Amino acid sequence: MSDKLPQTPHGFRTRGALLRAGRKVLEQKGLHKTRIADVAAEAGVAVGSFYVHFDNKEDLFRQLLIAVEDEVYGELSTVAPGTADPVQRILETNRLYLTAFKRNSRFWRVIEESVLLFPDAPSVLSERRVYYRSRTERAIRRMQQSGLVATTIEPAAAALILGAMTERLAYMWFVFDDRSDLDDLTGYLTRLWLNLLGIDDR
């Protein structure tokens, strides 16, 4: 990964323009067909300016991938444990995740492609998934301690299954189907979470 951080306001503006341009071009052409010249032209800078900020196309993509992952997964951090009843907390967490995923669905298609073409992509994705899966696992353990979830449920396995299901459903809904009924989808997904955890929302 490049450590070419800007040192001046102009540098920050140029880097920002390249990131925005890179995302636009990647969403239009995909990782394989995107050229550095395309990104530079979209940003309105010379190709040489690209290399001031990024090592190569893969470096640019990695920076964008981290930013999108931080947005999609990071919004879940705004739901603090203990601030609402478990059903509402799960509902709100799913709503935030689906909203952020939908907002980034075009780039998520590029991410899927990149897993086959870009060796670092799986490790970047895995870092974020492990972190937020551990959050889910801790939340399940807290609910078990309070008697809301049966102790027969294995928290780590449940967190893995729920996380994988949520991410894949979001991908199918918003990348392939371009679904817009976010409230209904949030409700369906939350019902699956509650069923697996054995939580009664009546």
Image (cartoon, rainbow, N blue to C red):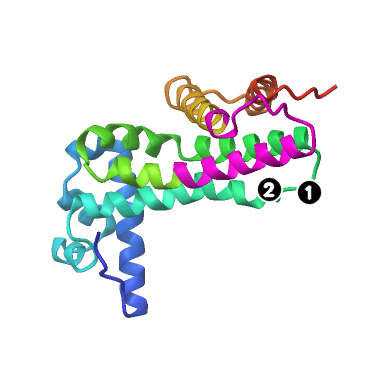
Query: Is residue 31 part of the magenta span, yes or no?
Result: no
C-alpha span from label 1 to label 2: 8 Å
Q: Label 2: few (<14), some or many (≥20) within 10 Å?
A: some
Q: Quadrant of the N terminus?
A: bottom left
Residue 22 lies, in percent from the top left, at 29, 50
The label shown at residue 83 is 1
Say whether marks 1 and 2 touch (CB < 8 Å). Answer: yes
User: Would you place residue 21 above or below residue 145 in this image?
Assistant: below
The answer to which quarter of the image holds residue 137 is top right
Specify start and end residues of the magenta stretch as a single range. Answer: 129-158
Q: Is mark 2 on a helix, strand or loop?
A: loop
On the image, the x and y values in percent for residue 50 come to: 20, 62
The residue at which mark 2 appears reads as 79
Residue at the bottom extreme of this rendering: 8
Determine the residue located farthest toward the right in the rendered image: 202
Left/right placement of residue 41 relative to residue 173 reads left
Q: Which amino acid does label 1 sit on?
A: Thr
